[in-house]
Image (tube, rainbow, N blue to C red):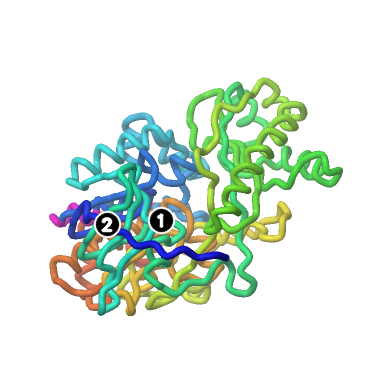
């Protein structure tokens, strides 16, 4: 590969106390949590709206609000208040037979922006992080961003990477593994799309979609068609209320594309191939599934849905063994409880799904000893592959975001690194805001039939 040396005098376009990069579920909650503490927060995103995969990718439903098996609520604090606000505006349904939270992406954008602005967060869209500068203490001194005006630098005391792929953390030199440790294989990406003209009364009657989750009858038909090479590889399928709630509409999660989302050529290839497969699969569904006979594609995600990429090596690792032994972390900031959900990395439609007990997620899986002013939140936390496969869902990412946001604000106020925090202060601060951060609270809720 040829190289070009590039030097440019870059203007400092903004200074803030905390810079949150990525306005997805984790970033939104991190920004609000930090701003609620009275520190100055800027939230940037490459899109023209917030929501991340929930809006740009149309990924749904929101999982991780309830424990998969017991149905006890494991999400509280800022994330739950956001969802309640969405529900009040007809944009989410928090309690239903499957406890999978369908939502309206437009309401999500609107409600989250309103709360962000009300909290005092400075929101800047169409701003993409492209690089960082480091000082002699290996602290990030600025994030270099690309905007419509060109390159610029944003300086902060603390930085929170909520980009999903860990763009800032990687540029800062944080150690990571790409994909699964054993072979670097990654779970597939999905072009999510939404249908109109769906006989939703029939789908509920014949597929039991609210409790069955996977459309079993359709899956058998698709598997037979795949064996005859009539259709491309698929997953699920999940044809349900996910990122849509209206009668006559359905969210579809079934397209599968394998590749490296951090590679600019690979991600371009799968975006194109995913849309092509979407039309092939929908044509088959329309001709072979009665309740989809009159359906049509309304829209698809502006970006392909990404499950898997970089996994960072932080102060501590979340492990499956720790989950199974109900390990307690003094710096727990969130509770996870989704199933271990691994989509096949080998090009097949197979899936590994195993229920897990509720588990604590420590701040130490989101901070670095070698980069004192960087925190991460979302699916790229330090976890073994089994725990990553559970903790990657949006509800859990929101909870992690709140915990990391509060931690960053405490660091700014005390002028310390995250590794120096008094964890009992962090835990009590989160609990004061209604966050659920320890297994004792979950066990009590399970005995009482769930937190409401």
Q: Position of residue 158 (x, y in %)?
A: 24, 65
- The image quarter in which residue 188 lies: bottom right
Residue under numbered circle 1 = 163
Residue under numbered circle 2 = 10
Q: Is residue 428 left or right of residue 150?
A: left
Where, quadrant-wise, is the N terminus in this rendering?
bottom right
Q: Is residue 156 left or right of residue 251?
A: left
Q: Is residue 93 above or below residue 153?
A: above
Residue found farthest to the right: 228
The magenta region covers 33-39
Q: Is residue 235 above or below residue 426?
A: above
Q: Is residue 422 left or right of residue 267?
A: left
Of helix, strand and loop, which one carries label 2? loop
Closer to the camera, 451 or 414?
414
Marks 1 and 2, Cα distance to the nearest angstrom? Answer: 23 Å
Of helix, strand and loop, which one carries label 1? loop
Closer to the camera, 57 or 252?
57
């Amino acid at each position: 590969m040829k190289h070009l040396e590039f030097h440019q005098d870059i203007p400092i376009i903004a200074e803030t106390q905390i810079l949150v990069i990525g306005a997805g579920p984790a970033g939104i909650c991190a920004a609000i949590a930090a701003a609620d503490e009275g520190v100055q927060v800027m939230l940037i995103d490459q899109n023209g709206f917030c929501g991340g995969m929930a809006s740009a990718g149309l990924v749904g439903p929101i999982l991780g609000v309830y424990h998969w098996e017991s149905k006890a609520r494991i999400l509280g604090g800022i994330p739950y208040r956001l969802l309640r606000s969405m529900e009040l505006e007809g944009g989410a349904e928090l309690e239903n037979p499957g406890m999978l939270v369908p939502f309206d992406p437009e309401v999500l954008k609107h409600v989250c922006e309103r709360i962000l602005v009300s909290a005092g967060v400075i929101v800047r869209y169409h701003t993409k992080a492209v690089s960082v500068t480091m000082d002699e203490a290996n602290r990030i001194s600025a994030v270099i961003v690309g905007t419509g005006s060109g390159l610029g630098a944003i300086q902060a005391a603390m930085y929170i990477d909520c980009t999903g792929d860990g763009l800032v953390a990687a540029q800062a030199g944080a150690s990571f593994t790409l994909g699964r440790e054993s072979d670097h294989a990654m779970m597939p990406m999905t072009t999510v799309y939404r249908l109109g003209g769906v006989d939703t009364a029939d789908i509920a009657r014949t597929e039991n979609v609210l409790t069955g989750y996977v459309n079993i009858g359709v899956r058998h038909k698709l598997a037979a068609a795949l064996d005859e090479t009539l259709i491309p590889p698929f997953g699920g399928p999940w044809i349900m209320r996910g990122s849509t709630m209206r009668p006559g509409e359905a969210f579809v999660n079934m397209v599968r594309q394998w590749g490296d989302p951090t590679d600019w050529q690979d991600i371009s290839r799968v975006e194109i191939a995913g849309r092509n497969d979407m039309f092939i699969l929908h044509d088959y569904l329309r001709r072979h599934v009665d309740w989809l006979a009159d359906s049509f594609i309304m829209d698809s995600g502006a970006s392909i849905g990404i499950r898997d990429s970089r996994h960072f090596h932080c102060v501590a690792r979340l492990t499956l063994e720790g989950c199974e032994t109900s390990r307690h972390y003094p710096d727990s900031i969130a509770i996870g409880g989704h199933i271990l959900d691994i989509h096949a990395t080998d090009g097949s439609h197979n899936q590994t799904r195993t229920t897990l007990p509720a588990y604590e997620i420590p701040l130490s899986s989101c901070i670095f000893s070698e980069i004192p002013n960087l925190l991460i939140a979302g699916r790229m936390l330090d976890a073994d592959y089994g725990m990553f496969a559970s903790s990657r869902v949006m509800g859990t990412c929101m909870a992690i975001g709140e915990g990391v946001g509060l931690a960053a604000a405490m660091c700014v106020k005390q002028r310390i690194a995250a590794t120096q925090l008094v964890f009992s202060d962090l835990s009590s601060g989160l609990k004061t805001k209604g966050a659920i951060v320890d297994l004792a609270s979950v066990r009590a809720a399970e005995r009482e039939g769930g937190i409401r």
